[in-house]
Amino acid sequence: MLKLSWPLAAAFVIGAAALTVSPGVVTAELALCVAWALVGPRQAIQALAVSVLITYANPALVTFGTSSGALARLVLIAAALRVLPTMRQTDLSLLWPVWLFSLTAALVSWISSPALAISVMKIITFTLATTTILVAFGRLTPRRLEQLQTWISTLVLVVVGLSLLTLIRPSVAFHRTHTGLQGVLGHPQALAVVLAPAAAWLLSSLTLMKGRLGVWTLIVVGTVCIAMLMTEARTAAVAATAGLALAALRALRGTRRDIGTASFGRLMAFAAVGLVAIAIAGLTTDKVSEATSRYLFKRSGAEDISGAFYKSRGGGILSQWQNFLNAPLTGHGFGVYANGKFPAGVTEFAGIPISAPVEKGFVPTAVLEETGVFGGLAFLFVIVRLARVTWRGGDPRLLALFGACAAVNAGEAVILAPGGIGMFLWILIGLAIAASRIKPKTATATVTAPAFVGMPIAAGASAANPPAQSAGGPMDAGHAFAGSVGA
């Protein structure tokens, strides 16, 4: 179920430690990412994942240089220059819905955006990032895809391990909110965005696929789920559950001979054991209900579920819906607030805006607020089109991965912002789609590792090309994971 390259893991940890040394090292690693993106499609994907995760490093561990933001953008440009010339006609079936949404967003933003330059910048970034990722995955052979899966599998375990290791220093582990685990990333929500698809993949592999259940497997699944819950991100739990439910639906309707799904009894057995364990814990101690209450009402001061929802996401959803009703055809501009203000500020390079963060939760109302009904329908078509490809692939783990990536946007609308942590979600979506398009027999042999990246990585040299012991072939340890404790 799970593949791990120990030499690669060691390279990630070394790179993690290196990033904590000085801002110059951070700048150097981002520069190496730019060069790495020019090597090939697989390396471009790795470089994109690495660069965005470097920019999301925990500030208690990593100090950034003044050119870090610009270099992160250069990684995307370098990846696009390397990948886009390889585009083929067969890629258009995936790309044209994305382009249709981007064109719609551009047209309505031209009419209504109070910050047109910001909207245009974000539309270009969205189109360039999603197109580059989908085309790059389309250029990977099954063997290269398997190698990339092992690379990401190893990385997510290092992310989880180092994030839990920061618990030794609570000032680092809970740097942002003081209660939610952020580990090696800059915010608990960022770590949750990383862990939710990983948890969905692992849980679906455990419950829906054939194979022996080893102690190592159970430990890994439990550790990832515990880390996810420690972030206090309720959206992550909902996303992982939604992904697993979608996977279960696909497994029950799928061809078991082709995708290697386990029996229905195995799924029911796991569900029964979980329910019994929760019931016993609830009857013997009140700690379960207390922990549940803390998780549901985290720092909101609310006394019930509806109050907690309104204070966390409900208020924003109602505001976005009202803004949509005020301009249902055009919205108020892609990637901006309706009033045109940016509380987090706008970052410019040579007078060109390169970053203007906005925080929006529920992606359906966010899309409607920004692009109106036409943009909302176009975006829905993108999701349905990509989900259909993954569904047809027949592997429930890929449905779990895709489903969790989509569902996490019920609380964090990051899929619209591939210039940030949303880049990671698009990489996972690209992985799910690419693996789904492989013939069933090949997919069964190769789709065996959780594909989830979630931490800053330092670009490595060619010496980081150790044999991937679990992958059965040479692997690119082209980037080393960054953000270890002990800064």
Image (spheres, rainbow, N blue to C red):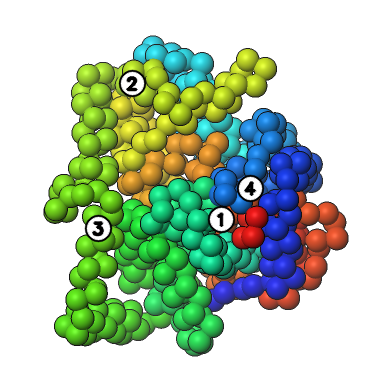
Cα distance between the residues tagged 1 and 3: 24 Å
Q: Which residue type carries mark 3? A: Leu
Q: Of residues 397 and 76, which is closer to you in this image?
A: 76
| Residue at 56% in and 55% down | 184
Give me the residue at 36% from left, 14% from top. 112
User: Could you say where residue 270 lies in the image, as x and y percent from the top left?
Assistant: 33, 81
Crowding near the residue tagged with mark 2, few <14, some 14–19, many ≥20 C-alpha atoms within 10 Å: many
Q: Which residue is mark 3?
A: 296
Residue bearing mark 4: 62
Q: Eyeballing the image, is 445 above or below 30? A: below
Secondary structure state at the residue bearing disc 2: loop
Label drawn at residue 184:
1
Pick the residue in front: 292 or 402: 292
Disc 4 element: loop
Q: Amino acid at mark 1?
A: Val
The mark nearer the N terminus, 4 or 3, is 4
270 versus 444 height, above or below = below
Instruction: Give the residue pinned by disc 2.
Output: 338
Q: Can see residue 375?
A: yes
In the picture as drawn, the residue positioned furthest to the top comes out as 111
Give the label, 3 or 2, closer to the camera.
3
Crowd around label 4: few <14 · some 14–19 · many ≥20 (10 Å): many
Quarter containing the C terminus: bottom right
Q: Nearer the viewer, mark 1 or mark 2?
A: 1
State whether residue 260 is above or below residue 313. below
